[in-house]
Image: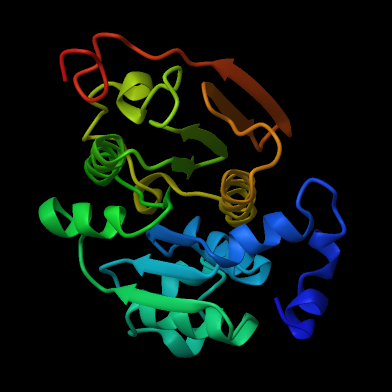
Amino acid sequence: MDDQQLLRYSRQILLPQIDIGGQQRLLDSRVLIVGVGGLGSPVALYLAAAGVGELVLADLDQVDLSNLQRQIIHHAADIGRDKVASAAERVAAINPQVHCRTLPVALADDALLAAVADVDLVLDCSDNFATRHAVNAACVRLGKPLVSGAAIRLEGQLSVFDPRRDDSPCYQCLYGDGDEQALSCSEAGVVGPLVGLVGSLQALEALKLLAGFGKPLVGRLLLIDALDSRFRELRVRRDPGCSCCGAAA
């Protein structure tokens, strides 16, 4: 690290849990963010500010007026632009030292596997079960840690799945095949600060995994009730019969 980097990251380097070694690990890290909407916005901004070396932003959509209530990485002038282009511009503005790659496509099959294989960690900031299951399967297959978050209405969820650990469940252990008919935010609504909170916690879990400090949310599901300002934690065990990560998979 040069003097400018030492100054830029000095507040987190001061933490004994991070120090110089942890900061260097962040600088050397590559992360895939699937979705740069409500959750991906704070994730991308905080990881860029923290000095994660490379961010890969994947999102097929363009910025819409209805996004601006919660997707804080995008501005009114970005309406109609690819979300990844808008997000990459903000990343460069907050930290020009971070290398940013954009994938304005729906990641699937070989393209998804290639994107996951090329990074150290994946953050699922998508909003549909099909993408979540596909990302989970790719992470299990390639042994990449996955930080998964979700928010709808006034409720949020967060967990970490780490296939490098024998005791870690995967997304499918927790949710099964999911409910493809589940409502989206456009149908059920969501309050903006809630996705900001969940996304910020996703960024924190990613920093813990990348820099190597603290206890990540592996085997634990954090439930957030924004209406009553309550947090609850559930234990999640690996399912030996899971069709994705189980013995018969």
Query: Which sits in the foreground, 43 or 75?
Result: 43
Q: Is residue 215 above or below residue 9?
A: above
User: What x and y, as percent, mark residue 3?
Assistant: 79, 83
Residue 124: tell me if it is visible.
no
Q: Quadrant of residue 166?
A: top left
Which residue is painted at 45% across and 62% down in the image? 30
Please state the horizontal and vertical placement of residue 213, each as a whole percent of the image.
69, 41
Task: Check the image and name the residue furthest to the top.
Answer: 240
Residue ID at (51%, 71%): 68
Residue at the location (57% across, 66% down)?
52
The picture quadrant where one finds residue 107 is: bottom left
189 relative to 183 in the view: left or right: right
**Is residue 40 visible to us here?**
yes
- Left or right relative to 202: residue 117: left
Q: Nearer the viewer, residue 14 or 174?
A: 14
- Quadrant for residue 148, please give it: top left
Give the residue drawn at x 20%, y 62%. 106
Which image quarter is the C terminus in? top left
Is 150 above or below relative to 120?
above
For the N terminus, the quadrant is bottom right
Q: Is residue 13 left or right of residue 127?
A: right
How many discs mark residues in the rendered view? 0
> In the image, residue 141 lies at what x, y percent?
24, 37
How has the structure been colored for display?
rainbow
Report the residue that reaches farthest toward the bottom: 77
The picture places residue 117, in percent across and down from the top left corner, at 28, 53
Q: Is residue 104 above or below residue 22?
A: below
